């Protein structure tokens, strides 16, 4: 049977983020099954383009921009605009199911558009209230935090089904009173067709960055405070003392960019820390090729304890060693000493000791790299992860064939 699915989204391709790549993987797999699939993006999709846009073979309907306003009026304007656009697309597309993806504003827009008899699945990739704390735009325990948390729970209880990316989110929803049997886990994964073949070291790039002959650790991603990159920079003098030829490569950008560069410049290991800024997605593998150990020093907070990141999986797929803080999201992905190394969160000395010990034990690298790659292939490959949605779709739509 051919299903017709509308995905309601915060933003999408051609923007590049973990969010858009996960969406791409889901929609592409559904198209490959012969299903009819479309996306509707909110006003938070910032890329310029036509009102209906095809990107990488996928069709997206854009919601027109709205005049900004102070909270909560601005958010209600966004919800109303998305609701209106979705109602227009629903009338044209006639979906069998609406699949809304967090943040909760997209789900509220879908619900406001009048779902009526159309089944509704809400997918939570992170709780909006915790993401705001992690991004520095909210404060845990504030009135806004509790209000947002209440809205998230209210929507989850009223959705026909809920999808989450990890067990941490599922457990938290159950504590909020969401029925366990309506929650499915669809974990983050790697599209091995796009990101599956490790790239040989790019020696020209290594020369350009001044890394010839160096032991190299690195971070590739967004520079948010919760990523703990200040602790990584703080660990560099200790690492430099232990490993005289070790360098740090920082690839990406974000809100913490300026302060991180200032900290690096003030460090006694400043000449070992290299910032390259954001790079096009098609160039990312060139930088992976130069890094021996990818380091993910996330700080301990609700967001990082509950949510599993995507980047460590990409590193494992690229046959790179992974060292990460022992927050809950990392523990759900990484087996310490088997597929990666875990160190105490918020502790630069523990980070330095763990990474130095990895370089002192190169004999263990081949087995660990092989084991981590096999873990991704067998457990975190999008081609197999996508199949988890189908039985839920069939149950909601009311078909078994």
Image (cartoon, helix red, strand yellow):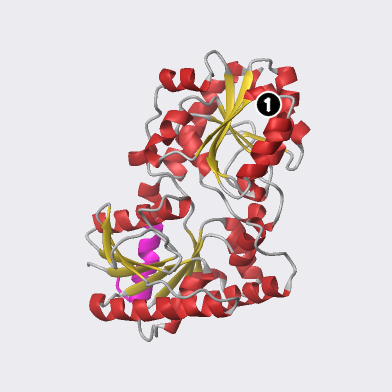
Which residue position is annotated with label 1?
Answer: 270
Q: Nearer the viewer, residue 158 or 46?
A: 46
Q: Nearer the viewer, residue 389 or 348?
A: 348
- Residue 316 in view here: yes
The quadrant of the picture occupied by the C terminus is: bottom left
Image side of residue 271 versus residue 121, left or right: right
The quadrant of the picture occupied by the N terminus is: bottom left
Location of residue 133 in the rendering, given as x and y in whole percent from the top left corner: 67, 60
- Residue 351 in view here: no
Number of labels in the image equals 1
| 110 up-or-down from 164: above or below | below
Q: Residue at x 36, y 52 (%)?
A: 25
Residue sitting at the far top: 213
Q: Nearer the viewer, residue 221 or 256?
A: 256
Q: Picture quarter containing residue 248?
A: top right
Location of residue 278 in the rendering, given as x and y in whole percent from the top left corner: 49, 40
Location of residue 166 in the rendering, given as x and y in whole percent from the top left corner: 55, 55
Span colored in magenta: 387-400
Location of residue 185 in the rendering, given as x and y in whole percent from the top left corner: 50, 59
């Amino acid at each position: 049977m051919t299903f017709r699915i509308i995905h309601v989204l915060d933003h999408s391709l051609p923007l590049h983020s973990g969010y858009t790549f996960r969406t791409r993987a889901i929609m592409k797999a559904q198209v490959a099954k012969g299903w009819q699939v479309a996306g509707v993006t909110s006003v938070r999709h910032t890329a310029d383009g036509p009102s209906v846009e095809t990107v990488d073979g996928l069709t997206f309907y854009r919601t027109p921009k709205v005049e900004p306003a102070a909270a909560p009026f601005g958010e209600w304007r966004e919800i109303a605009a998305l609701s209106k656009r979705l109602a227009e697309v629903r009338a044209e597309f006639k979906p069998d199911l609406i699949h809304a993806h967090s943040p909760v504003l997209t789900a509220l827009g879908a619900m406001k558009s009048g779902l009526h008899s159309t089944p509704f699945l809400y997918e939570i990739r992170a709780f909006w209230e915790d993401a705001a704390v992690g991004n520095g735009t909210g404060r845990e325990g504030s009135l806004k935090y509790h209000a947002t948390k209440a809205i998230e729970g209210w929507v989850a209880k009223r959705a026909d089904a809920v999808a989450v990316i990890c067990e941490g989110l599922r457990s938290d929803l159950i504590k909020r009173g969401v029925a366990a049997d309506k929650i499915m886990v669809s974990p983050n994964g790697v599209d091995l067709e796009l990101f599956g073949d490790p790239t040989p070291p790019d020696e020209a790039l290594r020369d350009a960055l001044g890394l010839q002959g160096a032991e190299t650790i690195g971070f590739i991603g967004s520079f948010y405070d919760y990523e703990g990159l200040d602790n990584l920079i703080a660990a560099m003098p200790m690492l430099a003392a232990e490993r005289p030829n070790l360098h740090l490569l920082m690839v990406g950008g974000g809100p913490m960019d300026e302060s991180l560069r200032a900290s690096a410049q003030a460090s006694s290991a400043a000449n070992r820390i290299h910032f390259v800024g954001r790079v096009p997605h098609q160039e990312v593998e060139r930088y992976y090729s130069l890094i021996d150990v990818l380091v993910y020093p996330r700080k301990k907070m609700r967001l990082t304890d509950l949510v599993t990141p995507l980047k460590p999986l990409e590193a494992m797929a690229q046959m790179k060693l992974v060292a990460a803080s022992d927050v809950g999201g990392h523990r759900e992905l990484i087996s310490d000493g088997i597929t990666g190394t875990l160190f105490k969160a918020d502790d630069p000395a523990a980070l330095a000791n763990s990474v130095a010990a990895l370089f002192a034990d190169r004999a263990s690298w081949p087995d660990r790299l092989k084991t981590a790659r096999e873990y991704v292939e067998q457990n975190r490959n999008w081609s197999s992860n996508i199949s988890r949605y189908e039985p839920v779709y069939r149950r909601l739509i009311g078909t078994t064939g």
